[in-house]
Image (spheres, rainbow, N blue to C red):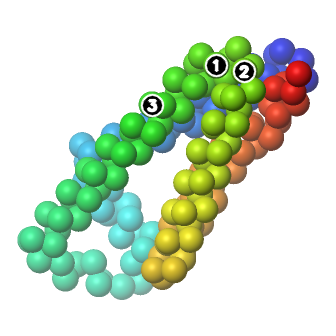
Amino acid sequence: MTRSWFRFWWYWLIIVTCGVIFFSFSLIIAPDFMQIFFDAIFFPASSTHTIFNEVASSYIKFLYGLLGAVMMGWSVALLYILLKPFCRQEDEAWYAMTASIVVWFIIDSSFSISTGFWQNAVLNMIFLLFFMIPLAATYQDFKK
């Protein structure tokens, strides 16, 4: 692949990773807004989510913050990989990115489906595609 195509896919990965960082940060600083977002995904035709008491709502906000912190830490590590070894086309960077995304997708989506929240697995599929398209496109650039 030409260097300009590699840079296109590399920028794509940086943008997607920064998007995940922004999403993660939103879970921390705007849990009420994110609750509305997730309610629309998980409870579109139901008012089940409105019956949470104050303690349950506080716990959900805590879990959103915890999830956001973990996702942010993971995304910052991915961003570092992209900015340094991936940019230098070091084989380990491509494998680290790909393994991290695949492991997250399998575990998160399997858990989501097994607990009845298939909608999250659909959301995961969108994120998977945003990452895997450029990773697949750059695979040959890492073969030496």
- The one nearer the camera, 126 or 1, is 1
Identify the image quadrant of the C terminus. Answer: top right
Is disc 1 in contact with disc 2, using a CB cutoff of under 8 Å?
A: yes
Residue, disc 1:
85
Query: Which disc is residue 116 wearing?
Result: none
**Could you tell which of marks 1 and 3 lies nearer the N-terminus?**
3
Q: Amino acid at mark 2?
A: Glu
Q: Secondary structure at mark 2?
A: loop
Q: Amino acid at mark 1?
A: Pro
**Could you tell which of marks 3 and 2 lies nearer the N-terminus?**
3
In the figure, is residue 84 to the left or right of 135? left
The label nearer to you, 1 versus 3, is: 1
Residue, disc 2:
90
Query: What whole-number distance in Å separates the C-alpha atoms at marks 1 and 2?
Result: 5 Å
Query: What whole-number distance in Å separates the C-alpha atoms at marks 3 and 2?
Result: 18 Å
- The one nearer the camera, 111 or 40, is 111
> Can residue 119 be seen in this snapshot?
no
Q: Mark 3 packing: few (<14 Cα in 10 Å), some, or many (20+)?
A: some
Query: Which disc is residue 76 wearing?
Result: 3
